[in-house]
Image (cartoon, rainbow, N blue to C red):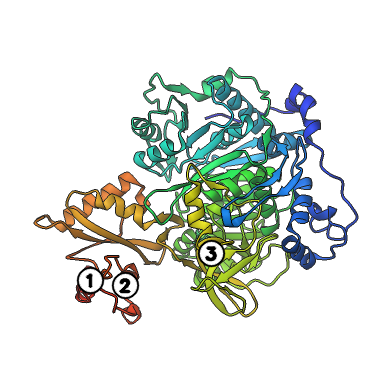
Amino acid sequence: MWLPCGCTSKYVASSFARRTLASYLHVSGRSRCNVAAFMPEAAGLEGVSGRAALRELSVSNSESFWAAVARHRLCWSTPFHTVQDCDLSRGKIKWFEGGKLNVSVNCLDRHVHTCPERVALIWERDERGSEMKYTYGELLEMTCRLGNLLRRHSVKRGDCVTIYMPTCPLAVASMLACARIGAAHNVVFAGFSADALAERIRDAQSSTVITVNQGVRGGKVTELKKTVDTAVQSCPTVKQVFVAMRTDNPVTMTARDIAMEEEMLKEDVVCEPAVMNSEDVLFLLYTSGSTGKPKGLVHTQAGYLLYAALTHRYVFSYHDGDVFGCVADIGWITGHSYVVYGPLANGATTVLFESTPIYPDPGRYWDMVERLKINQFYGAPTAIRLLLKYGDQWVNKYDRSTLKTLGSVGEPINTEAWEWYHRVVGDGRCPVVDTWWQTETGGICIAPRPSDPDAEIVPGMAMRPFFGINPVLMDTEGEVLTSNNTSGALCMAQPWPGMARTIHNNHQRFIDTYFQPYPGYFFTGDGAYRSEEGYYQITGRLDDVINVSGHRIGTAEIEDVVNQCPAVAESAVVGYTHSIKGQGVYAFVVLKKGIDVQEADLSRQLNGMVSEKIAKYASPDFIQFAKRLPKTRSGKIMRRVLRKVVESDLEGLGDLSTLDDPAAVQEIIQGHEKLL
Ligand code: 6R9
């Protein structure tokens, strides 16, 4: 693995820095507006007094707000001429057109210019106590060498490179190298199986894949290169695979494979950044929806980066010099926005966490907080629930006095976990911010203190919309609910720069999924409650997407795999409440007539198939074999009924009159009771 080499200011002296930085660095001057002390980005907005007015303006006059912020926060090589050109009814979203910039310059060069020795990355390797630090100068060097290497191997502007790597500095450099040369990246979570990887490579039409020989997580070695070898067999587009070395173990290299570090050494440390349009694609990221096929959400350059940077700064009260510790994997949107782009755009020191919360013991996070002096810690409720069960002693052993803010993301945080996080981890002195957002939104949309660092926080509530975010709740008729103390479908009434622009190769699906259910609004797929005070609390998905340990998975994806088993006639998968994972996977399976198998054997086989075709976390916790599934007269499986059965909420079964044969429900209930 590429080692930090103590390189210093040669970039500043480099020809690129001399020639180009000046043209990137026209940050507008600050005015005397009195919100400037709180939000210097808004300094151009004359006449706004106070944070509440600023928040108000960000929605009522979002163009002025975003224009001022974009001018201040990003370095442009050409200023934009149009702030926004959006029409939600058609799924048309464009921000900062006319503007040109390079994301890697914004994340690296401008900080190297001012402080090359500042630490950009702290790689918290799986092996405890072996962390490695990389300065902005070193990260720029890695990125430039890699950018040149990709260019030499014919990766062009507009190509899409698939990255299948654990969270490590070379993965970050790979993302930034793509950004540097104008290629899009498609990071695939390194826990995904060969089939899932292949599907994403094919859909993205990548000809280049970047991986490592082996991954190391929780003390276990995973054969990532071998998985890529299997995947690319069904990916005719793939021409080359760059292989970095995470461990010392050699792997078989074929004609298509390129030893990444070795080749990087031959490259120049200066790499001319591509001048990108605001709306050129920065990355694709696949996520689950309610159909079997994952969708490649597309994020573009300027709007995404701006939104990631601004939310990173204000939601967590990040200040210059802080060490930001987001423990998400870079394979998820949280890793993209709050491990990589947001923190680096802000010149932060960001932690790359390669391990698990309980390796080698349940003190891992807090030992890391002490060692790396982390100021903001951002993690998932599933890990908090797990650690809570191990007891307070694992937390109390370590000095956590550097912590200032604790964040939560990915799923609802239950009160018990929230209280423990606040009282034990944060010693009752750190605000806990429950942040709601999605792959689609690019960055945090609802969080407790987006515009006021002293605002009241209610446990377990995401609470307040971020600047420029205008949430609404819809009733079942598609009408906006105007009162408080009410629940409905969570939609956004206005576009914001961070939102996804389309689904790769399928704009119609983008429109159908997000803009057609409530015309003129962006539909999130989540339900929410708005309290008497106007605070938002997310109540969960309204579609067939479930959330297992913070991983989003479509039940249809699992059904697709189960149905591929020759013995299976049909299946229905639902989520059920799980004390640690948040939700677990429960599959109902109907076998074909005349099939005679041991249910235990078949269960094992089905679990194996799901792990192999998707990922381990998607594998069912329970498989219930049934003679038939409850259906409507028109033949639709009544998932609502199945969900109630697995929650043992028989009172809540509701109206069964539309069922084709109500006796099917009784059979299902009996089968469920037997399984428990
Ligand atoms: C960032 C991320 C998005 C889905 C989202 C919602 C759930 C995320 C949440 C939350 C309750 C929170 N979700 N944050 N639910 N409270 N604070 O997780 O993106 O993987 O796309 O998942 O996760 O259901 O719709 P993604």
In this orientation, which residue lies closer to the viewer: 221 or 646? 646
Q: How many marks?
A: 3
- Please give the name of the residue rendered at 19% of the width and 66% of the height, measured from the top-left corner: 628
Location of residue 87 (image quadrant): bottom right
Left or right of residue 528: residue 643: left
Location of residue 131 (image quadrant): top right
Residue 342 in percent (x, y) is at 65, 47
In this orientation, which residue lies closer to the viewer: 476 or 436? 476
Most distant residue in the bottom direction: 651
Q: Amino acid at mark 2?
A: Val
Numbered tag placed on residue 337 in the rendering: none
SS state under label 1: helix
Cα separation, mark 2 vs mark 1, equals 10 Å
Vertical position of residue 623 compared to residue 106: above or below = below
Who comes first in sequence, dot 2 or dot 3? 3
Vertical position of residue 137 compared to residue 584: above or below = above
Beta carbon of the mark 3 residue lies under 8 A of ligand 1: no
Asked if residue 619 can be seen in this view, the reply is: no
What residue sits right under mark 3 in the picture? Answer: 518
SS state under label 2: helix
In this orientation, which residue lies closer to the viewer: 582 or 50? 50
- Answer yes or no: do the residues labelled 2 and 1 have beta carbons within 8 Å? yes
What residue sits right under mark 2 in the picture? Answer: 641
Q: Residues within 10 Å of mark 1 (few under 14, many from 20)?
A: many
What residue sits right under mark 1 in the picture? Answer: 668
